[in-house]
Image: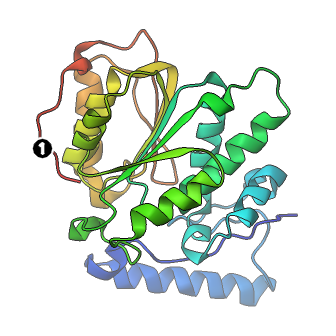
Amino acid sequence: MKIIRETTAFFNKQYSDAPDGSFLKAIQVAFIKKIVETLGKIPEHVHYADDCFVLYRNLGFLSDPTFCKACRESELDGVLFGRIWRIYVLAWSLSQRWRAGGVYIDCGTYNGKALEVALRYAKYKSESRLGSRAEENLIIAADLFENPPDEARKKDHGPNLSEEVRVRLNKIHETKVCKGYLPDSLIDLQISTPVQWVQIDLNSEVADLSTFRYLMKYLAENAIVVFDDYGFSRYSKTQQDLNAYVEENALNPILELPTGQGLYIHTRESGQKGLLEPQKRSVL
C-alpha cells in the first residue's frame, strides 16, 4: 500500500499558454474522473502526477518509509505532491553522493522546500552507515530569490526569501545561501572542494548550460547532475544545447527521465574541453 498518494496538479505553464494546453488538461481531468467512476478509486499501480500518467508500475518510492518521513517532516504542500516523482529523483540522487563528502549545490533553489526533502532523505539514509562524512558536507542554495525573470517567477519570490531558505535548510544541515545571477554568484564563491551533486533548475537554456560548464571542472568522480528542465518541451532548446555540449566535449550522455528531468553522471573518461570558463553574465 502506498504511504504517499500523489496528486494531479496542472502547474506546467503550457496548460495555459500552449495552443493545445486547455484541451489536454480537460482530457486528463476527464480520464481521472472516468477511472474513479469505473473502478471506485485510483489503482495503486497508477501514477498521475508529474505531468504524466503511468500504468502498471510498482511505484515503490511512494511507500519508501525514509522518503515518506522526509516528506512528512518537510510538510510538503500540494505543489510538491504534484511533483512527487521529481522530488524523489532529487532526494535519491543526493543520497547516492552524500557519503562521499564535499560540496552539494542546488542552482535555482526557490523556496528550498524540494531541497529540504532531499537533505532529510540523504541524511536519514546515511545515519545507519559507517564512515559517513555528512558533517563535513557543504550545501549551497543558489538563486536570485528576489526578482527572477518572468519565466521563473513564482509566488514566494521576494526580499525575504533568501533568509527564509537559510533558516529552513539550516535546521537540517549547515547551508550557504548564494544570492545572485548564475553562474556568476558561484564564481564569486571560489569553490575548491570536489562537487558531488548538483541540481540545475534555472528555466533558461543560457543559464543552465553556462552553469553546467562552469561547474564541470569541480565535479568529482561519479558526481551527479540533475537538470530539472531537460525533458520538458517548453525547454526544448535547453535539451538541444546541453546535448550538443556533451557530445562536442565527449562527456557522458544525459539520461532523459519520464519526470522531465535529465540525469548526468560524471566520470574521468568524460572529455576535458568543457573546462572552459563561461562568459559573464548569464541570465537566470
Q: Nearer the viewer, residue 183 or 152?
A: 183
Quadrant occupied by the C terminus: bottom left
Label 1 packing within 10 angstroms: few (<14), some (14-19), many (20+): few
Residue occupying image coordinates x 27% and y 43%: 185
Residue 14 vertical position relative to residue 265 in the rendered view, above or below = below
Residue 111 in sight: no
Residue 262 pos. (x, y %)? 44, 42
In the rendered image, which residue does mark 1 sit on?
Answer: 281
| Foreground residue among 242 and 58 | 242
Q: How many marks?
A: 1
Q: Is residue 188 left or right of residue 192?
A: left
From the viewer's perspective, is 114 left or right of 46? left
Q: Who is closer to the viewer here, 192 or 42?
A: 192
Residue at left 76%, top 34%? 126
The amino acid beneath tag 1 is Arg
Viewed as shown, does residue 156 lie left or right of 238? Answer: right
Taking depth in this image into account, of 152 and 139 the one nearest to the observer is 139
- In this rendering, would 44 be left or right of 80? right
